[in-house]
Image (cartoon, grey):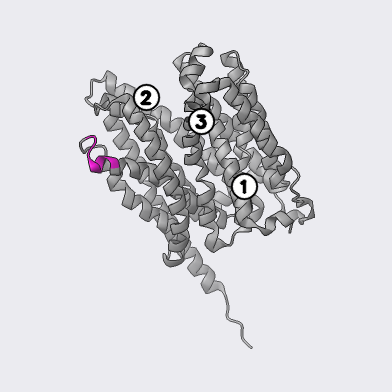
Amino acid sequence: MMFWKKSPPAVLASLLVIHLMAHIDRNMLLGFSPQIIKDLALSNAQYGFLVGAVWVLSFGVMAMFMGTLADRFSRTRVIAAGVLIWSLCTWASGHAQSFEQMVVARFFVASGEAALVPAAVALLAELFPEQRRGTAMGLFFMGIPLGIGCSFLLAGSFGATHGWRTTFYVLGIAGIVIALPLALLKEDHNRLAPQERGAAFLPQVLAVLRTVGGNRALGLTIIGFVLVHLVFASFSFTQLWLVNERGMNAAGIATRIGALQLVFGTLGAAVGGVMGDRAARKLRGGHASFMALLVVICGPLMLAYRFVPAGSPLFYIGMCAGFFLPLAVYGPAITAVANMTPQKMRSTVTGFTMLSINVFALAIGTVAVGMAADYFVKAGVSAPLTRVLIATDALALSSALFFALAARVSRRQRAVATDNVQPVRS
């Protein structure tokens, strides 16, 4: 084992910092949206394309491709290459003078960032024992809410003084500085036997599809995990809903949403990971049962939030439950997927999961919410967004059914495996 693998907590801390930087770079476009729209003379449609379709398509597709590379070659060098690509293109984003130039830069920022999660998940699954794996995954995914919060804080502090272009330059250079020593960490997959390494892209993808299709518990877990992400599709319209249909002040609620999401998203990632490991040892269905329980607890609060008076205690409790739930599911969901996946395809299966989330929940889900809202507006329906968001929340909460089914299948699979173990007779 390489020397750097002898300290799993240090590896986890390093990956968390890199994940944090990835989400700062990813969300910096949102933090500087007014300035960038003005300087590049973007239309709302062009801006939406930049933060939506460009990112989702590039990140989703490349996550699976990068996953196959991480299963076949050095995971540290795949991550280093990804950091280098996204950092160079973050730096290039600061030089963009047109919509087309920004599209190209952001496309490759997303492509580079797609290397991180698949390789990091497989690495953490190897370094941490099964009983602590969810905790490690939860801490790693704290990078999502922390990165979102830090991107807006950075835009409002350093960015307010030095401008968006300089901020992109500094972030790009910082990433390049991190990528270079990371590439020196040795992890030689060539020493593994051929059956212990991932295959080339197409055979590996086909093997992953067979694995997911042939393992009902794994497939059901991934479906549930994708459905939970519909909470983010709702979140894209939350501020619009609060202002237009609940009568809240746009400036005031934006600050409040940002702070609450940062606090409760981070809390969700940490608590979900730690509690998931503990509950998995006590619940018969393991991590899947814990995730179903999480959804059942948070679901009523999230639905009540759509009906109670704006600004009431239950209103904010429900809002915070919506920020808490999807991040709380990350640790146990990724751990459950990793535990059911052969080591030689963990990165690729993680990439497949990220692809599914980005295409079905974030891309199609968000567009469907917008189209449904437009339809109800034209039909003259009162409170159109409220109706659509309640339906979206209900779909997200239906993930509890899939997690419960995954838990049931897992119990049956373990029972069959136990029955098949013949006692050794002396």
Q: For residue 355: magenta? A: no
Point 51% across, 11% down: residue? 41
Point 23% across, 20% down: residue? 380
Q: Tell which tag, 2 or 1, sits nearer the viewer.
A: 1
Indicate the position of residue 381 as horizontal and vertical percent values. Answer: 23, 24
Residue located beneath label 1 in the image: 14
7 vs 236, left or right, is right
> Is residue 403 shown to the viewer in this render?
yes
Closer to the chain start, of discs 3 and 2, is: 3
The one of 279 and 181 positioned closer to us in this rendering: 181
Range of residues picked out in magenta: 310-316
Indicate the position of residue 265 as horizontal and vertical percent values. Answer: 42, 43
Contact (Cβ within 8 Å) of mark 2 with mark 1: no
The one of 151 and 57 positioned closer to us in this rendering: 151
Classify mark 1: residues with Cα within 10 Å, few (<14), some (14-19) or many (20+).
some
Tag shown at residue 371: 2
Point 43% across, 53% down: residue? 271
Residue located beneath label 3 in the image: 154
Q: Tell which tag, 3 or 1, sits nearer the viewer.
A: 3
